[in-house]
Amino acid sequence: MATALSAHLLQHYSTQKPKIASYSDGLSQARLGQVTEYIHQHSAQNPSLMIMAEMVQMSPYYFSRLFKQSTGLTPHQYLLKCRTKEAKRLLKTTNLSIANIALQVGFVDQSHLNCHFKGHFGVSPSQFRA
């Protein structure tokens, strides 16, 4: 009852109108930069959606929607894209086995890397390396 009374009093007798933040264009550049930096730094682990949402002080659901609006990708799709780009860089610059690269960038195994690598670049990691 106290909450309802407070809401009624504020709604009908307040001298200032509440300012509700609107995020119609997605995340701000500062918040997006903060989150993408976190994803890049923790891409080999499994970055937590909860932590990312807390970083920008939003619910995980709302954060996911705004992130997709800003980048065109869900946070998970963005993470997979970062991992495949890092795998591509390691395939070019090192002689590590594909299985080791897969584990190093955060994929479960080589097959998981193959699936996403081929989806992003159109060729398998072994074909790209050759």
Image (cartoon, rainbow, N blue to C red):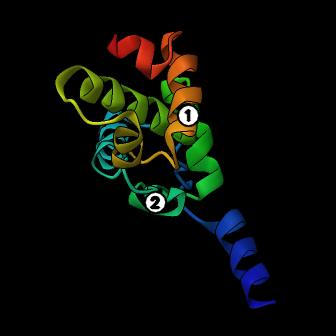
* Residue at which label 1 appears: 77
Q: Mark 2 is on which residue type?
A: Gln
Residue 9 falls in image quadrant: bottom right
Q: Which mark is residue 17?
A: none
Q: Mark 1 is on which residue type?
A: Gln
Q: Dot 2, how many residues are within 10 Å of its Cα: few (below 14), some (14-19), or many (20+)?
A: few
Number of marks = 2
Dot placed on the residue nearer the N-terminal end, 1 or 2: 2
Q: Residue furthest right?
A: 1
What residue do we see at 48% from left, 45% from top?
107
Q: Locate the N terminus by quadrant.
A: bottom right
Residue 25 visible? no
Q: Position of residue 78 (x, y in %)?
A: 48, 34
Q: Locate the C terminus by quadrant.
A: top left
Q: Is residue 35 left or right of residue 72?
A: left
> Is residue 84 shown above or below 52?
above
Q: Which mark is residue 57?
A: 2
What residue do we see at 31% from left, 42% from top?
40
Q: Dot 1, how many residues are within 10 Å of its Cα: few (below 14), some (14-19), or many (20+)?
A: few
Residue 102 visible? yes
